Image (spheres, rainbow, N blue to C red):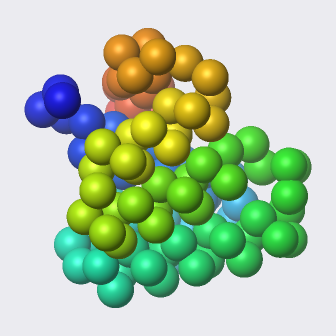
Amino acid sequence: MHADAEQLVRFDLAQTARKAGLECPALVIECASTPAQWRAVAHDLQRARRVWGSHVPGLYAAHEAAEKLAEGNLDGALAALVDGCGMSAEGWLELTRGEREEARS
């Protein structure tokens, strides 16, 4: 796995949370380090899915990824996000890396 995969997964999850108006969970995503924090994020993303449905793309995959992170499964989290957008892992990592760089500038 790529050295920056965890940071890219966190970036993508935080961006999705912000699109759903979940600023506090987005902040937790950026620094979460315990299963309890990831479970709380997963809960909020799941609730947002019920409210926003398909109006916020990526919420289902983000919820699944957060659940995987609560289990300590970074590979599973990456797979959930990759499957959610129908790309290869390499393609997703490259695209997300570019989005992160664009957001920083």
Q: Nearer the viewer, residue 51 or 87?
A: 87
Which quadrant does the N terminus fall into? top left
On the picture, is 96 further left or further right than 15? Answer: left
Whole-percent x, y for residue 96 in the image: 43, 27
On the picture, is 99 further left or further right than 7? Answer: right
Name above or below for residue 28 compared with residue 66: below
Which quadrant does the C terminus fall into? top left
Q: Residue at x 25, y 36 (%)?
A: 5
Whole-percent x, y for residue 46 in the image: 67, 71
How many discs appear? 0
Name above or below for residue 93 compared with residue 44: above
Q: Residue at x 31, y 69 (%)?
A: 71
Q: Quadrant of residue 79?
A: top left
On the picture, is 54 further left or further right than 43? Answer: right
Q: Nearer the viewer, residue 17 or 89?
A: 89
Name above or below for residue 39 compared with residue 59: below
Q: Nearer the viewer, residue 88 or 41?
A: 88
Whole-percent x, y for residue 30 in the image: 33, 61
Q: Quadrant of residue 84?
A: top right
Name above or below for residue 9 compared with residue 69: above
